[in-house]
Image (cartoon, rainbow, N blue to C red):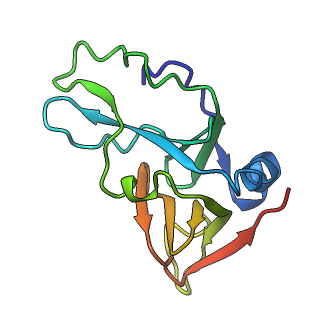
Amino acid sequence: MGISGFEPSFLIGVDPVRQAHGSRLATLAGRRLTGFSLVRFAEDGSWFADCPVVLDFDGIQVEVCHWKFDELSIGWDAIDTTAAITGWESYELTPLWSHSDGRLEPFVGRELREVTLLEWQPAGRDLAAGTVAVEFAFAGNRLRIVNGLDENRIETGAAHPDYVRHGLSR
């Protein structure tokens, strides 16, 4: 993708994600969201949802990226959102880091209460069954980065009831 520092390590399923990142995610509780970065196209401002969502909690950067139907990569303090995104010279659109998004802006400056992993477990057959979302709970509202089936999707508010919560501990 040409993103400086982005070297994803994709995991499948809630147990591998919790084992690899659960305790570190849990330690974010009590920190404030001080910023975020998304990749948008310069030409039309649209979000390129295939790229990682980068959240900064008082200087600790967590980088969340969903891929394919069930893979999730969580990175830490690796992506340089001040560096240009390269390798797109032959494409019609130009990806740039953006620090503007109406879904994320209301959370900036707020203290994180808890991080939870959510596992999609619908009652019926569903291609997305077993996918893992990362939920960040703030006073009065929640922010989730979920698998949008081969890309990231950002959701706020209460989670769909078909998600099973998996708490994290330090």
**Residue that appears at 41% across and 56% down:** 153
| Residue sitting nearer the eye, 33 or 136 | 33
Residue 124, given in percent of the width and then of the height, sits at: 52, 85
What is the x, y in percent for residue 91?
21, 21
Is any part of residue 99 visible from this angle?
A: yes
Residue in the picture at 49% in, 78% down: 158
Write the residue at 70% across / 57% down.
Answer: 29
Seen in the picture, residue 119 relative to 150 is either above or below; the reply is below
Q: Quadrant of the C terminus?
A: bottom right
In this rendering, would 164 be left or right of 103? right
**Residue 132 in sight in this render:** no
35 left or right, relative to 25: left
Q: Residue at x 25, y 12 (%)?
A: 89
Query: In the image, residue 61 lies at what x, y percent?
Result: 60, 37
Question: Observer-nearest residue: 91 or 144?
Answer: 144
Q: Quadrant of residue 76?
A: top right
Q: Is residue 87 left or right of residue 13?
A: left
